[in-house]
Image (tube, rainbow, N blue to C red):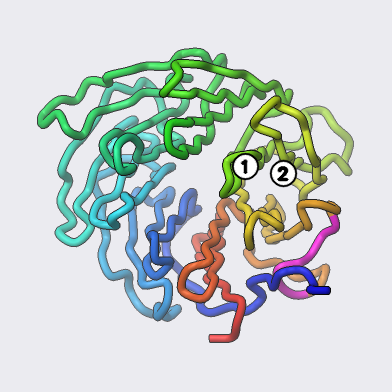
Amino acid sequence: MTGPPPLPLHLHCTLRAHSGPIHVARLNSFGRYLLTGGADRQIHLFNASSASSSGPPIKTYNSHNGTVQALDISPDNARFLSGGEDRNVYLYDVAKGLVLRRFSAHHGAINALAFAGEQGAALVAAAGFDTTLRFYDLRAQGAWRPIMECKEAKDAILCMAIRDANVWTGSVDGVVRTYDLRKGELREDTIDRPITSLTPSTTQTTLLVSCLAREGGGDGEQATHSLLDLSDGTHLQTIQGGPNRQYRCRSTLWSSDSTVIAGDETGCVRAWDIVTGQERRVAGGDEHKEHAKATLWVEGTDKDGGKLVSAGADGVVKVWGVQPS
């Protein structure tokens, strides 16, 4: 009988990446390179496999005039998207550092971005504070207006996920909205808490939904991580997470969707078995904190030997692995 899958317990490197909170950290498709965006308006590119704590980033991108809230990397790793507080969406050439396109149809901060469409990169999906999900066509050179707008959200959209023709958005209004672009259908599942993170399983049969602690709850009230059955909206599992009343702490599924990993406002990174709900710590003992301030983002990959990235309000990114480096 095999035991639980190994967790990324080993700290490979610590990057003092930004002078303020880091709101997003994305690994490329190979798990070797890392993009980070933060409150200092900067986007940095690091080698996640060989970076050192004292080394500078490979490249810095600085087109934004406000906090960088969202990033996404194209499937071929040649381009990336950025968006944030200044309401602009930029499409970059990674190697050249050039802005290829700019979209500015939004009326508030952009919280979520993703490539979509044919081969995963023909369209851009963007959403945020103005409650509208917009799609842009990258094949139409020079066009900047959205080709489609979805205005069903009643409050700010904080997170989004895309797989094939399915788009999921999570909003402060506590509703997960599932858009099936092929069928032209929309389904709404009410969670009744502000939704901070969405992660579909590899089979696209379930969706990990992370939410803030309930407003007005007692001192022991925690954030929640729920597993939603995408066929009928059934809640298969709900895990009581760490304390989080105000931050958009991103969570993730680890190791064939068997484990939930998430940060919290205390600076911890925690893990739970998806079936039993039993907690498994990612690093250290009960008193150990991975970040000096809130852990705002975690992202994992099974590429490059297995890697987890955590980013915090302390301006630090940590890269963790299953095996010692």
Which SS class for mark 2? loop
Report the amino acid beneath label 1: Tyr
**Residue 1 coordinates in the image, percent (x, y):** 83, 74
Label ID, residue 247: 1
- Label 1: few (<14), some or many (≥20) within 10 Å? some
The part of the chain drawn in magenta is 278-284
Residue plotted at (43% across, 28% down)? 127
Q: Is residue 25 above or below residue 239?
A: below
Q: Which residue has dot 2 on it?
A: 244
Residue plotted at (28% across, 70% down)? 58
Foreground: 52 or 75?
75
Query: Horizontal placement of 224 versus 33: left or right?
Result: right
- Label 2: few (<14), some or many (≥20) within 10 Å? many
**Residue 198 coordinates in the image, percent (x, y):** 59, 39
Foreground: 58 or 267?
58
**Residue 112 coordinates in the image, percent (x, y):** 44, 36
